[in-house]
Amino acid sequence: MKLYRFITGPDDSEFCHRVTQALNKGWELSGSPSLAFDAERGRTMCGQAVTKEVPGDYSPDMKLGDY
């Protein structure tokens, strides 16, 4: 089965570490990163889609970050 996650957060090193951690757990980048400016908080927000092939069947109860 193919899993999908969309990692989001402020444009900072923590966001980059979260994406790096996912890549090192076997997730692969899916498409380009996205950026949006949060005018209310005055900061740039990032998003990156990642996918991963794993055995088994999908369940909505899965905690995707654990894979």
Image (cartoon, rainbow, N blue to C red):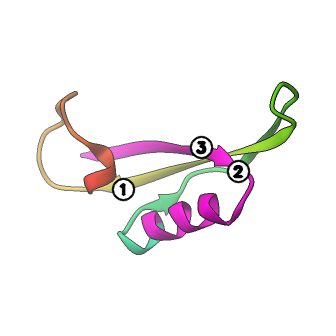
Mark 1, other Cα within 10 Å: few <14 / some 14–19 / many ≥20: some
Give the percent coordinates (x, y) of residue 67.
Answer: 26, 57
Mark 3 or mark 1, which is nearer to you? 3
Left/right placement of residue 18 relative to residue 31 reads left
How far apart, in angstroms, are the residues tagged by discs 2 and 1? 17 Å
Residue corresponding to mark 3: 8
Pointers 2 and 1 in contact (C-beta within 8 Å): no
Residue corresponding to mark 1: 52
The residue at 83%/25% (across/down) is 40
Q: Residue 33 got which mark? A: 2
Give the percent coordinates (x, y) of residue 63.
Answer: 25, 42
Q: Is residue 57 placed above or below 61 in the rendered structure?
A: below
Give the percent coordinates (x, y) of residue 65.
Answer: 33, 51
Amino acid tagged 2: Pro
Range of the magenta residues?
Answer: 1-22
Left/right placement of residue 31 relative to residue 55 reads right
How far apart, in angstroms, are the residues tagged by discs 3 and 2? 10 Å
